[in-house]
Structures are given as C-alpha cells and as structure tokens.
Image (cartoon, rainbow, N blue to C red):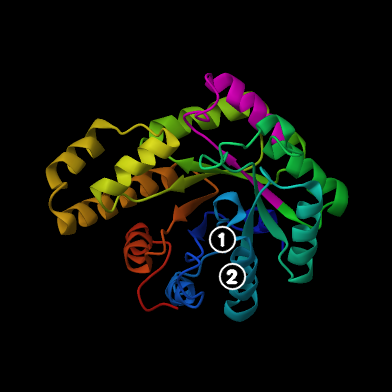
Amino acid sequence: MRIIELYRQKAPLLSLEIFPPRMAYPLESVFDTVKELKKLNPAYISVTYGAGGSNRERTVEIAARVKKEYGIEAQAHLTCIGHRQEDIKNILARLNREGICNIMALRGDIPEDEPEFDFRRQEYHYAFELIRDIRAAYGDSFGIAAAAHPEGHPECPRLKDDIFHLKNKVDNGVDFLITQLFFDNRIFFDFWERCQAMGINCPVIPGIMPVLNAGQIKRMIYLCGASMPAGLLKLVDKYEKEPVDMEKAGIDYASQQIKELLENAVAGVHLYSMNKPRQISEIVYNIGLASPGKY
C-alpha cells in the first residue's frame, strides 16, 4: 500500500526510521531493533540508504524483510547523486520485484572523500529529477516521499528559494514530505505555513531526533544546520558530562516537543530511531501513541 493512503485513512500516524548496519557487522543485528520497534505498531518503517550507495543492497533487503517477515509497511530510501539513470532503473526494478512500493526520494550528499567528483557531469543533480523519472516509468505504482528542511537546505542561502525548490519536487510527483530534524516547534509551524502559502498542500510530517548524548547533538547541528533553542542548550550544558541524565532529559524534551506537534494537528510524527528501540519506546509511550505491553 502506498503510504499516502495510510495518511488519508488515519491520523496521526507514527513512523520510524532505521539504518542498515555497517558492512562489517551482520545484517541480522538490525532485526533485533525491528522486533522491538514492531511493538510500537508503527504505520511504516523507513530504511536509510548508505552514503554514496554503500549500503544500497542492504537497504532493499531490510525493507523487503520488514514488510514480508514483520508485516510492517516499508519505505526504502533512494539517493540519485553519483548514480547513472541505468543504475536507478535497475534499483527501481528490484524494489518492484520485492514488493516495496514506497520510496524516500533524495539527492543524497555530494561525496567529500572523492576529490575527482564532478557535480556538473552527473546524470542526476537534484531530487526532483529522480522523482520525475520514477513517475514517468512507474506512474502511481510507487508512493514517493521527499525531504523538507524547516530551516532551509544548507546549500540554499534563502528559505524562500528552498521552499520554491520543494514545490518543484511536489509538482513532479511527491505524495508527502518528511522534514529533517529540528528542535524548536516554532520553526516547524512557520515553515508549514510558508509551504501552504507556496501551494504545497500535501502532508508535511515533522521528523524528530531525540538528543540522547551531547556529542550526537553537536554532530547533527553541524551536518544539518539545525539551530538549538535556549532550553535545549541549557540541558546539554547541564548534563554534558552525565550521560544517563542527558539521555533522560533528551527523551523528556523530545516527548514534550511531539506532544505539542500532535496538539496542532500534524498528520503524523516521524522518529529518527538511530536503532535505539528502548529510548524510542519510552518516547512513544510518553506521547500516548502506544502502550507498554499492548502489542
């Protein structure tokens, strides 16, 4: 089933994101996480795509098993930068054979460790080109989601321009949007209003990443450009050297953030699980989207 149909039938939905283990680790390790996350009864699980396609095969296999063995709708990430159109054609064919009918269509990061990489010579430059090609080849057979950046894409200097490009992705066939992480709900609500003003009327799903340790938050801010509100900054400063207390404070902060979002009629919440089912379960129980021992 295309995920957009789930959003049309019921709201709010809980969705979760996991990532494939590194190639040095056994694939089965991720399914210990899936078994625990299944207890939360998510509407779907999204499986990320390794940088530069390094975990491409694992993404497809994990997504297929999440759907077939665990009975959870799966969404496979697909990046296009560095891929030829023939590569994308083959990946889509495999997803189709495996029964995976939902894709998170992304450009992907430009490789920093490839000095000879020439962006201008690539067959794909932007996510809308991937979205356009999926729709041209498969029509509505695939459900397509795309990423949104509430504070603007790091490579785009003006938020207005970034939302214009986002509208282009939607116009080329996106069903719904999932945001990158943010820590201040006011930023999301402002972004949501700007999207509507631009004519983006599909669901915009807030993506939430709980702050579980101080090092993690610093890395995420560096990579995504997310700003840190004063309240969260105080928590990090207070508990930076106390990991147990930092984790508890991060779980509480994310829980309160999600509660406020749900009170304002979002269509769902997307939790970046970081393959940490215990902490994610605590948050989901806190916000009332699942109950311990219910499933």
Q: Position of residue 243 (x, y in %)?
A: 18, 56
Q: Quadrant of residue 194?
A: top right
Q: What are the residue bounds of the magenta stretch?
A: 144-170
Q: Residue at x 42, y 48 (%)?
A: 208
Q: Please tell me the numbered disc located at residue 241.
A: none
Q: Position of residue 265 (x, y in %)?
A: 50, 44
Q: Quadrant of residue 147?
A: top right
Q: Please tell me the numbered disc located at residue 47.
A: 1
Q: Position of residue 5 (x, y in %)?
A: 70, 57
Q: Residue at x 66, y 42 (%)?
A: 81
Please give the residue where the numbered disc 2 appears in the rendered image.
62
> Do the residues bearing badges 1 and 2 touch, measured as CB atoms within 8 Å?
yes
Does residue 235 sit above or below 93 in this rendering? above
The local crowd at label 2, few if under 14, some if 14 to 19, many if 20 or more residues have their Cα within 10 Å, is many
Report the amino acid beneath label 1.
Answer: Val
Q: Please indicate whether residue 278 sits to the left or right of residue 230 in the image.
A: right
